[in-house]
Image (cartoon, rainbow, N blue to C red):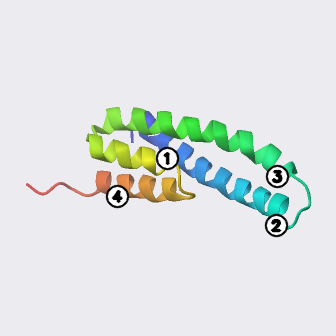
């Protein structure tokens, strides 16, 4: 697997994990009303990983020669929680399947 695709995979997983941390932090801030430490920690971490995910989609698209629709889908998957995992798995599965002639 080329380096750009491997890094994209790692960033997609990390971005989803940061989503989980941010959601837990928001629960404690807004629902449990017990402080905003989780949001202060995971907010910037998630922001950085979000930007890295977008860059990762663009780098992986170049290496894997994704079409515009696939790139748009990958970028859209940066917004809803955990969809970066779905997109990463889908793209990995497509690379592994042999293309029928």
Q: Earlier in the sequence, mark 3 or mark 2?
A: 2
Under circle 2, the secondary element is helix
Gap in angstroms between the C-alphas marked 2 and 1: 32 Å
| Mark 1 burial class by Cα count in 10 Å: few <14, some 14-19, many 20+ | many
Which of labels 4 and 3 is toward the front? 3
Which residue sits at x=79%, y=56%?
A: 25
Q: Earlier in the sequence, mark 3 or mark 1?
A: 1
Which residue sits at x=12%, y=57%?
A: 100
Residue 72 at x, y percent in the picture: 36, 44
Task: Look at mark 4 in the image and give the residue it sits on.
Answer: 93
Which of labels 3 and 2 is toward the front? 2
Task: Look at mark 2 in the image and give the residue it sits on.
Answer: 31
Residue 38 at x, y percent in the picture: 82, 52
Gap in angstroms between the C-alphas marked 4 and 3: 34 Å
Under circle 4, the secondary element is helix
Q: Nearer the viewer, residue 85 or 51?
A: 51
């Amino acid at each position: 697997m080329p380096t750009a695709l491997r890094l994209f995979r790692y960033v997609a997983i990390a971005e989803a994990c940061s989503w989980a941390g941010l959601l837990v932090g928001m629960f404690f801030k807004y629902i449990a009303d017990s402080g905003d430490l989780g949001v202060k920690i995971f907010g910037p971490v998630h922001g950085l990983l979000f930007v890295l995910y977008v860059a990762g989609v663009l780098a992986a698209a170049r290496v894997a020669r994704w079409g515009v629709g696939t790139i748009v889908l990958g970028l859209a998957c940066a917004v809803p929680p955990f969809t970066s995992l779905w997109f990463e798995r889908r793209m990995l599965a497509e690379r592994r399947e042999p293309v029928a002639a």
